[in-house]
Amino acid sequence: MRSHPLQIQVEYPPRNTTVQVPSGLNGRVSAGKELRLTCVTDAYPAADPFSWLHGSSSQTPLSHYRHIGGGSTMTIEKVQRADEGCYVCSPSNSIGMDFSGPQCFKVQYAPTNIQLSMVHKVREGRTFTIRCDVSSFPPSSLTLFRETGSSPEYEVSNSNKIGVHNNVLVYTTKAAEQHAGRYKCVASNSEGRATSEQRELEVQLSDESSLLRQESARAVF
């Protein structure tokens, strides 16, 4: 008498769990765009339910991640800056559970909160500083402009006295008559562009310059 083969199905908890992301994302997503994450795992019986966790960085302990939803796929319809960080998927079944590694993203956003800081009045020959700060990612290209009533807009950023680093522009020089005028800062990156409010700088001439100007005016007449 021949026996019939006995088939045994081994049950096991979720394993080899990963988070799949759209191709070409490269760890960055633009604000306002959709982000879709899919949890892929191997389990028997099939994994259910799924949990999604969000943390601020890959260095954040898993215990500090917060639960943000369920389902094998998580969709953020319009990404905001607060969505930046790392995502972990946790599938489970009747046997156990598993955690994926963190999948991290930076949120790209246009320049915002652009601020131009400078004095209103400076004495000729004194050192003064103009500073432009902006919030953006990726970092913005910052350009400083000056205009006067008698001349067109001039790009001060051509000067070797300009320093730009990590969304901060700093321009420092000694005040001369030609530095008087209205200044503005323009920030731009791949996501957009922003312009600061204009601020005016008055240069008070030294006694010597004032005297020379008066003598020049008398010579005309």
Image (cartoon, rainbow, N blue to C red):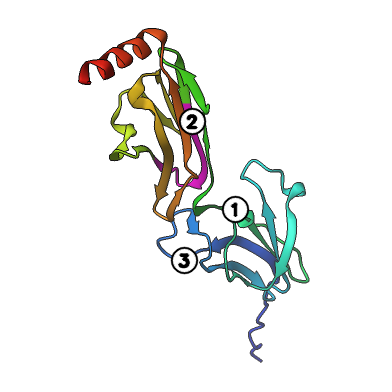
Which amino acid does the dot numbered 1 rest on? Glu
Residue 97 or residue 55, whichever sits in front? 55
User: Which stretch appears magenta?
Assistant: 130-142
**Label 1 neighbour load within 10 Å: few <14, some 14-19, many 20+:** many
Residue 82 or residue 98, whichever sits in front? 82
Kindly indicate the quadrant of the structure image that contains residue 149. Answer: top left
**Percent of width and height locating residue 90:** 69, 62
According to the image, label 1 marks what residue?
84
Marks 3/2: CA–CA distance: 39 Å
Q: Residue furthest bottom?
A: 1
According to the image, label 2 marks what residue?
131
**Percent of width and height locating residue 218:** 27, 16
Q: Earlier in the sequence, mark 2 or mark 1?
A: 1
Per the image, label 1 sits on a secondary structure element best described as: loop
Kindly indicate the quadrant of the structure image that contains residue 12. Answer: bottom right
Residue 168 in sight from this viewpoint: no
Q: Identify the residue at image location x=40%, y=49%.
A: 189
Residue 187 in sight from this viewpoint: yes
According to the image, label 3 marks what residue?
22
Q: Identify the residue at image location x=49%, y=59%.
A: 30
Marks 3/1: CA–CA distance: 16 Å
